[in-house]
Amino acid sequence: MSRHTPIVHKTRTQVVVEVLREKILSGEIAAGEPLRQSALAEELNVSRIPVREALLQLEAEGLVKFEAHKGATATELSVAQVTELFELRALIETDLLAKAIPNLQDEDLIQAEKVLEQLESAFKQEDAVGSWAELNTKFHTTLYQAANRPHTLEVVHGLNTNCDRYIRLQLLLTGGIPRAEQDHRDLLTYCKQKQTDKAVVLLREHILHAAESIRDLVAEQVK
């Protein structure tokens, strides 16, 4: 019986991670808001141990920070963070895409098309905001995987997790959806046509345009 306990325990922690991540990314838990372990444990009907472990994982994702005498809080919105995260993404993701395009197979492109259709459908549903980031990452990942750079892809996923709430803010509050949809369609077309240079230029503009919109938005939020 005891041999199975860690698996159950890990699953419980993972559930808490997912619930708290969603609350922070959706804004239900505001930036700077204290995350009290005892209150969260009671609310989620678990012990404090999985809550503590979940907060540590969310700290690694950049969504929670621990401070002396204050405990855990949801991280603040930051113009400087937006600039750094999105410039890193522009550097790394364009390099991945350039390496991936020559290796893209028909099945990769068919899969990317399917995910893109799911994302476009989610954009039209108000109750599907929570799935936007996951589907967006899945679409880009489907194109990048052919680069055969698993460690680089892992770095990109970490950056995307940190960018997630910023991207949601941009799409929800700045009317960014039509441009995002068009960019994704054009990107897929360039990948199908093996037009690496055009695809890389578009991807860089796609990421940096989002950063610009979000910086303006965050500057307003933190005034």
Image (cartoon, rainbow, N blue to C red):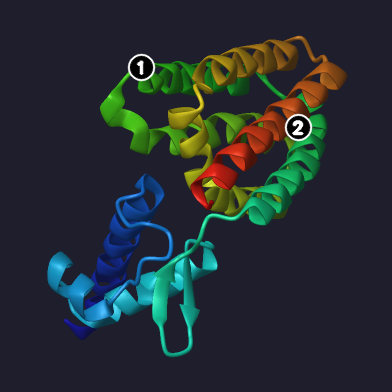
Q: Residue at x 49, y 21 (%)?
A: 175
Q: In front: 165, or 161?
A: 165
The nearer-to-camera label among 1 and 2 is 1
Q: Residue at x 76, y 32 (%)?
A: 97
Q: Mark 2 falls on what kind of element?
A: helix
Amino acid type of the residue tagged 2 in the rendering = Leu
- Residue to which mark 1 is pinned: 124
Q: Residue at x 13, y 73 (%)?
A: 42
Instruction: Farthest residue to the front: give it.
Output: 223
Find residue 29 and report its horizontal and vertical position in percent: 32, 57
Which quadrant holds the N terminus? bottom left
In which quadrant of the rendered view does residue 183 lie?
top right
**Residue 105: mark:** none
Q: Mark 1 falls on what kind of element?
A: loop
Note whether residue 3 is visible: no
The answer to whether residue 141 is above or below residue 76 is above
Q: How dense is the environment of label 1, judged by Cα within 10 Å: few (below 14), some, or many (20 and up)?
A: few
Amino acid type of the residue tagged 1 in the rendering = Lys
Q: Does 191 sit left or right of 76 as displayed?
A: right
- Residue to which mark 2 is pinned: 97
The answer to whether residue 145 is above or below residue 116 is below
